[in-house]
Image: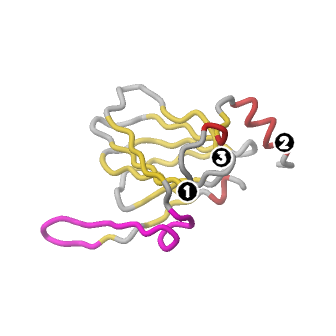
């Protein structure tokens, strides 16, 4: 997998004068079935989240409220995505290092994941990540 496979997915948005509604169906709107959902909130100013890669996990990251930046790295290239629309999700494929920062006050980051939590799926050391990507031929 490489960084070009990470992309913004525009989710359905149903407009209504009473408020908008967005929904997500695994395998239909996103390229995986949803096994786990979690969210980050009350992130202190200046704090960073992420700082890891997943060996096999697929994720969709959504700024449900507020905004934040996601920095992606596949071992060869890097890009930063500013998340600030609740109807857009960032698809992150396996073997992409991610770091998140610049959280606005009141930001809520929701993550949909393809698998249940598994600590063995994480690469938490950047040098190990780079070594693993080189061994995979990237």
Residue bearing mark 2: 134
Q: Which residue is mark 1?
A: 114
Instruction: Look at 53% across and 64% down and name the residue there.
Output: 33
The front one of 4 and 35 is: 35
Vertical relation: 84 (above or below) 20:
above
Report the span colored magenta: 14-33
Q: Is residue 51 magenta?
A: no
The answer to whether the residues at label 1 and label 3 have Cβ atoms under 8 Å apart is no
Few, some or many residues within 10 Å of mark 3 (<14, 14–19, 20+): many
Q: Regarding mark 1 in the picture, which secondary structure is present there?
A: loop
Vertical comparison of 10 with 62: above or below:
below
Kindly report which numbered mark, 1 or 3, lies closer to the viewer in this rendering.
Answer: 1
Task: Work out whether residue 8 or residue 132 is closer to the camera in this orientation and state it.
Answer: 132
Q: Nearer the viewer, mark 1 or mark 2?
A: 1
What separation in Å lies between label 1 and label 3 (alpha carbons)? 15 Å
In the rendered view, tell whether residue 126 sits above or below residue 1.
above
N-terminal of the pair, mark 3 or mark 2, is: 3
Q: Is residue 24 magenta?
A: yes
Q: Position of residue 51 (x, y in %)?
A: 58, 33
Q: Disc 1 and disc 2: Cα gap in Å?
A: 25 Å
Q: Earlier in the sequence, mark 1 or mark 2?
A: 1
- Residue 38 rendering spot, x and y as whole percentages: 41, 46
Query: Residue 79 placed where, x, y %?
Result: 60, 46
Q: Earlier in the sequence, mark 1 or mark 3?
A: 3
């Amino acid at each position: 997998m490489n960084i070009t496979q990470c992309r913004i997915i525009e989710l359905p948005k149903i407009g209504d004068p009473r408020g908008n509604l967005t929904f997500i169906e695994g395998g239909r709107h996103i390229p995986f079935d949803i096994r786990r959902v979690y969210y980050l909130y009350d992130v202190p100013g200046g704090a960073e989240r992420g700082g890891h890669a997943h060996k096999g996990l697929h994720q969709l990251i959504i700024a449900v409220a507020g905004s934040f930046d996601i920095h992606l790295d596949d071992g060869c290239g890097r890009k930063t995505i500013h998340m600030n629309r609740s109807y857009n999700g960032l698809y992150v494929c396996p073997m992409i290092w991610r770091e998140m920062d610049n959280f606005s006050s009141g930001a809520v980051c929701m993550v949909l994941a393809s698998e249940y939590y598994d600590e063995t799926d994480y690469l938490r050391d950047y040098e190990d990540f780079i070594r693993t990507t080189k061994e995979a031929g990237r």
